């Protein structure tokens, strides 16, 4: 199908705004961060949560979204190419997931590139996940899951692998159009790498700043020796996303190695659609799918 009619005007507006800016290679990190925050602000403030608190966990700044009677703790890792996202760009979906899942959400404000290149963000996310798993009662109750979108999906997948290796049990890993291979050359990369929200030039700009080791599985979890034994997974992809095929490949490899996995490809959607739930029906459905999957995982014995 073509672009979803609800997402198309947003894509066109984003394309028009991008045309008014210099090429991405001539923009500063501050400019890109400001532009991303403006895009995310289109979705509005999100639902009220009983307690929202900025705090520090394992030395890492985080934001806690606490619900009374929460049945689990979801550690959320924001996207933004390891460079431009932050707690505010993902405040609305974190609020919505906390509300719908009836769980506590902890959003991680990990160190970003270029100030802190690879693997600083990996270390921060893992420190928070490890601390929360070891002290669940301090941050909520019940089991712990990890979730992230795009580069945050990369970091959530890596944290799930590290939890397995440390014998820490996670209830689930919820990966939203995850970036799982920094040297991806799959068909969706060439088919959808121009003119939409995420382009090849933008991805190359991200990688220039992030400076990962392409052979390190912590940068490309698809290259891990084995995925067997990791937490059950939900993998969401979008039809018109350059990252679509690598997300599908990750879901297929998880399944082949015996991991329980659900894959959902959202037709007509583009990268970053998850943050547009109040504006796009399919995005709201994706947020609800994440919340429902988290809630079910927390209730599973």
Image (cartoon, helix red, strand yellow):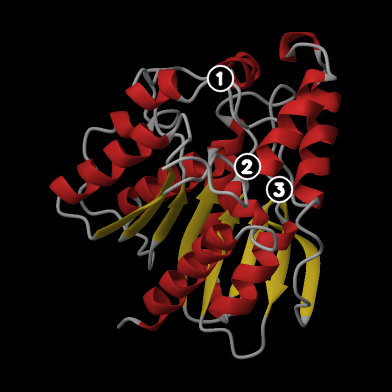
Q: Quadrant of the N terminus?
A: top left
Camera-side mark, 1 or 3 = 1
Residue 296 location, quadrant? bottom left
Query: Residue 15 at x, y = what percent?
Result: 71, 28
Q: Residues within 10 Å of mark 1 (few under 14, many from 20)?
A: some
Q: Residues within 10 Å of mark 2 (few under 14, many from 20)?
A: some
Camera-side mark, 2 or 3 = 2
Question: Which residue is under mark 3?
Answer: 109
Residue 95 location, quadrant? bottom right
- Secondary element under disc 1, as helix, strand or loop, is loop
Q: Are marks 2 and 3 in contact (CB under 8 Å)?
A: no
Seen at 64% across and 23% down, the residue is 117
Q: Check the image and report above or below for 77 versus 285.
A: above
> Who comes first in sequence, dot 1 or dot 3?
3
Q: Check the image and report above or below for 178 versus 294.
A: above
Distance in Å between CA atoms under marks 2 and 1: 15 Å
Q: Is residue 153 left or right of residue 96?
A: left
Question: Which residue is under mark 2?
Answer: 8
Query: Residue 121 at x, y = what percent?
Result: 60, 37
Q: Is residue 254 left or right of residue 291?
A: left
> Who comes first in sequence, dot 2 or dot 3?
2
Q: Check the image and report above or below for 34 versus 205.
A: below
Seen at 50% across and 61% down, the residue is 286
Distance in Å between CA atoms under marks 2 and 3: 31 Å
Distance in Å between CA atoms under marks 1 and 3: 29 Å
Query: Residue 25 at x, y = what percent?
Result: 73, 9
> Who comes first in sequence, dot 2 or dot 1?
2
Q: Which mark is residue 194?
A: 1
Q: Check the image and report above or below for 189 versus 104.
A: above
């Amino acid at each position: 199908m073509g672009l979803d009619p609800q997402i198309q005007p947003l894509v066109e507006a984003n394309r028009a705004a991008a045309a008014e800016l210099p090429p991405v290679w001539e923009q500063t990190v501050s400019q890109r961060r400001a532009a991303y925050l403006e895009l995310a602000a289109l979705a509005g403030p999100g639902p009220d949560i009983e307690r929202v608190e900025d705090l520090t966990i394992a030395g890492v700044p985080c934001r806690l979204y606490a619900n009374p009677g929460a049945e689990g703790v979801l550690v959320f890792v924001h996207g933004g190419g390891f460079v431009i996202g932050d707690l505010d760009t993902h405040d609305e979906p974190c609020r919505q997931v906390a509300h719908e899942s009836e769980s506590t959400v902890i959003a991680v404000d990990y160190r970003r590139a270029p100030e802190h290149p690879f693997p600083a963000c990996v270390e921060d996310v893992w420190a928070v996940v490890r601390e929360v798993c070891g002290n669940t009662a301090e941050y909520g109750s019940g089991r712990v899951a990890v979730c992230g979108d795009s580069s945050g999906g990369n970091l959530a997948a890596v944290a799930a692998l590290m939890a397995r290796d440390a014998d820490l049990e996670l209830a689930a890993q919820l990966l939203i159009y995850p970036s799982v291979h920094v040297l991806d050359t799959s068909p969706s990369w060439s088919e959808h790498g121009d003119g939409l929200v995420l382009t090849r030039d933008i991805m190359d700009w991200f990688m220039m700043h992030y400076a990962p080791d392409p052979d390190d599985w912590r940068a490309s979890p698809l290259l891990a020796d084995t995925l067997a034994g990791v937490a059950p997974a939900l993998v969401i992809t979008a039809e018109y996303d350059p990252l679509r095929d690598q997300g599908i490949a990750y879901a297929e490899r998880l399944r082949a190695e015996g991991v329980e996995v659900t894959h959902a490809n959202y037709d007509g959607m583009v990268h970053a659609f998850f943050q547009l739930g109040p504006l796009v029906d399919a995005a709201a459905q994706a947020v609800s799918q994440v919340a429902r999957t988290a809630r079910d995982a927390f209730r599973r014995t």
